[in-house]
Amino acid sequence: MLEIKNLHANAGDEPILRGIDLEIAAGEVHAVMGPNGSGKSTLSNILAGRPGYSVTDGEVLYSGQDLTQIEPEDRAREGIFLAFQYPVEIPGVSNNYFLKASVNAVRAHRGEPELDAMEFLTLSQEKMKIVDMPTDLMNRSINEGFSGGEKKRNEVLQMLLLEPKLSILDETDSGLDIDALRVVAQGVNSLRSPERAMLVITHYQRLLDYIVPDHVHVLSGGRIVRSGGKELALELEEKGYGWIEETNA
Amino acid sequence: MTSAERRSISGWLEASARITERGDALPALREARLQSVTALSEQGLPTRRQESWKYTSLAEIAKIEWSAPADPGEDVLSLPSTPLSRQAGLKAGLVDGQFVSDAESSDGAGARFESMAKVRTSESVHVNDLEVLGQVADPKLHFFTALNTALVRDGVCLEIDRDAQITSPLHLSITDSKSEALSCPRLAVRARAGSRSTLVIEHLTPGDGPRLSAFVSEVIVEPQAELDLVLVQRGGAESFLASNLYAQQEQHGQLRVHTLTLGGRLVRNEVVSVLSGQGAAVDLRGLFIGSDERHIDHQTTIDHAVSHCTSRELYKGVLGDSSRGVFCGRIIVRPDAQKTDSQQSNPNLLLGERAEINTQPQLEIYADDVRCSHGSTIGRLDPEALFYLRSRAIGPEAARAMLTRGFAQEIVDSIPQHVDRTEIETLIVEALAAATSRDSS
Ligand SMILES: Nc1ncnc2c1ncn2[C@@H]1O[C@H](COP(=O)(O)OP(=O)(O)OP(=O)(O)O)[C@@H](O)[C@H]1O
Ligand SMILES: [Mg+2]
C-alpha cells in the first residue's frame, strides 16, 4: 500500500529526514517511536501533503502512485488520513458542518450519494458513541476550546467517519487519560481490517498494549535505526533510546 | 470645489429652497433644514483633506448629475417583498422616498409605522409628538446628514409602545430604484420605556444604473428599553450608499446595531451613539464584505456622557480583489463618565492581493476610573486551518469559503434569533462568494 524509499525531506529549509525506507502492506499496523525532534511528525506531514515540507530525494508510492504529486485533498479522498499531533482550532465553523462536508467530499469521490443532514446525524452519532464523545462537541466550532483529550477524540471520530485506507496517527495518545486511551484505541481497532493499514506514532508502549502493532520502528535523527516486532517497544521502554544508539555504535 | 461639485451643490440648494417655499411637509425639520443649507453651501462636498474623509473620496459622486428627490407621489404603492420581510411582523417601506405600509399589519400589537409627512389624524401619533425627528441628528456634523435634511420629503417614524415585547421583527425596506437619482430616506424611532423589539432595515437598489442614497436615522431608546437594529445594505455595483445613524440611550436603555454591508460601489456609514443615561449600553456590530473596487467606510462615535455605561464594538471586514475598507472608531468618555466600560475591536480578513483596510481607534478619555480597550487586526486566511480542511478531503476553494464564512459567523450569531438567519446567511454567502471568486491566496 505504501512504499517509502530512501526518503530525504526538508521541513522548511532544514533537512530532517535522511533516508527512510519503509513498506506498509494492507492489513498491517506499524508503530513508529523515537525521541523528540527525530522527524516523526515530519514524516507524517510529508505523507499528508502539508505545505512547508518538501521531498529532496527518494520516493513515496501510495498504491503505486507517486504520492508527492497529489494534492492534500486528493490524498484524503484516496484514503489517506492524518490524525494531527496538534489539531487546529477553527472559530466560526461548526464541527458538524465541517465533518459533513468532509464525509460528503469523500463519498462524492467514491461515487456514492451525499448524505443529507439526517443521514449524517445518524452516522455521526453512531461513531461518536464509539469514541465516547459528548454530542454538544458537534455544534461547537472545530476544536475551539476543546480540551486536549477532546481534540484527540475528534481526530479519531474523523477517522471513523472517513474510513481511510491508510491512517497515520501522530501521537493521538498523548494528552489522553487512561480511560480515554482505551476508548481511542478501541476506535482505532474497530477500523483494523485486511484492507486497511495504520502508522501509529507514539512515545508510549502503553498504547501498543491496546493497538498491537505488527512492526515497530525507531526513528532517530531522520533515519529508521531499528525495526522489530512488538517486543521492540517493550525493550525500548525498559532500556531507553540510549540503548539503541549504543548497540548501533 | 470643482465646477461639477459646485453644480451639484447649487442644484441641491435650489431644490431645498423649493421645498421650504411651497410649505414644508416636515415642519419638525424647519430649523435643521436651514442649518443644512448653510452647511452645504459653506462646506460643499467633503474633501480628503478633512480628517474623517482622508481615505474616502466623493469625487465620483460629483461626476453624475443626480436628480433631486421628487414630491412623494399620490399612487398607492405596494410593499416590495424582500428576503427578510417574509418572516417579519409589522412592515413598512420607503420606495423612492414614498412611504408605503402594509395595510394588513400597519398597526400591529405594540408598535406602529407612520409616514412623517402624513397629516396628523386624531387617533395616530404624529412624528412631532415623538420628539425624535430633527432632535438627535446634527446636520452640521456630517455631509450626508445635511444633504438628507435639506432634501428629505417624507420618511418613516416608528413608535414602540411602553413595555411592548415584540417578538416578530419589525421590518423597513428602503428601495431606491431610479437611476441617477438622489434619495434621502429618513427614519425616526422612539423605543418607549421597557419595550423590547427588533427592527430590520433592508436597503436595496434594484435595477441598473448609479444611485445616491443618503439615509439618516434618529433613534431614542428610553429607560430600560431594548432595541436591536439590523441594517442590511445591498446596493448595486454602481450605488453610493450612506447611512448615518444617531442614537441616544437613556438609563439602562440598550441598543444593538448589526450592520451588514454586502454591496454598493461606495458605502459610508456614520454611527453616533450618545449614552446619556446611567446603565445604558450600546453594542455596534458590523460585517462588511468588499469585492471588485468597492469601498466601505465606517465611522463610529460612542459618547459616554454619564457614568456606568457600557459600549461594545465589533466590526469585521472581509475584503477581496481591490476593495478597500475604512474603520474609524471614536470613543469619548466625558469627565463625569466614571465606571465606563468600553471595548472596541476591528479584525479584518484581506483576501485580495490589492485589498486594503485603514483602521484607527480614536480615544478621548477625560475620566480616570474607566476600562477601555481596543484592537484591530489585519490578516489573511490561516494556512494551518486551510491545510487541516484540505487534509479532510475538502477542496481548496470550499475550504477557503468555509474559513471566510467562519470569520463572519460571529456577527451572524449575535443577530436576534427571531430574524430569518437562514436568509441572512444566504445573503452573506453570496457576498462572500463575490469577494473570494478572484482570490488566489
Ligand atoms: N518548518 C520547519 N522549519 C525548520 N525546522 C522544522 C520545521 N518543522 C519542524 N522542524 C524541525 O524538524 C525537527 C523534527 O520535527 P518533528 O516535528 O518531525 O519531530 P517529532 O519527531 O515529531 O518530535 P515530537 O516527538 O516532539 O513530536 C525538529 O528539530 C523541528 O524543530
Ligand atoms: Mg511530533
Image: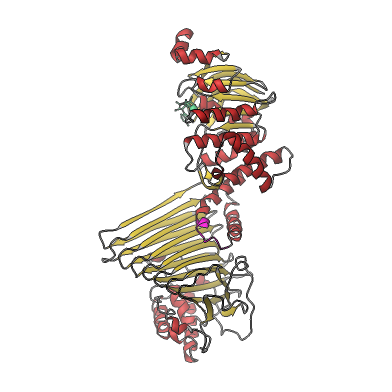
Residue A249 visible:
no
Q: Is residue A85 magenta?
A: no
The residue at 55%/41% (across/down) is: A134
Residue B195 is situated, as x and y percent measured from the top left of the image, at 46, 71
Rendered view: B321 above or below B223: above
Residue B179 is situated, as x and y percent measured from the top left of the image, at 60, 74
The residue at 42%/64% (across/down) is: B299
What colour scheme does the image use? secondary structure
The residue at 49%/91% (across/down) is: B23
Rendered view: B14 above or below B353: below
Q: Nearer the viewer, residue A180 or A113?
A: A180
Tell whether A199 sits left or right of B295: right
Residue B147 is situated, as x and y percent measured from the top left of the image, at 46, 77
Q: Which residues are magenta?
A: B411-419
Tell whether A103 sits left or right of B380: right
Rendered view: B437 above or below A37: below
Q: Main secondary structure of the magenta part?
A: loop
Question: Can you say which quadrant of the picture contains the N terminus of chain A?
Answer: top right
The residue most toward the bottom is: B22
The residue at 56%/83% (across/down) is: B70
Residue A162 visible:
yes
Tell whether B346 sits left or right of A196: left
Residue A133 is situated, as x and y percent measured from the top left of the image, at 55, 38
Q: Nearer the viewer, residue B352 or B222?
A: B222
Q: Which quarter of the figure has residue B427?
A: bottom right
Tally of numbered discs: 0
Q: Nearer the viewer, residue A18 or B366?
A: B366
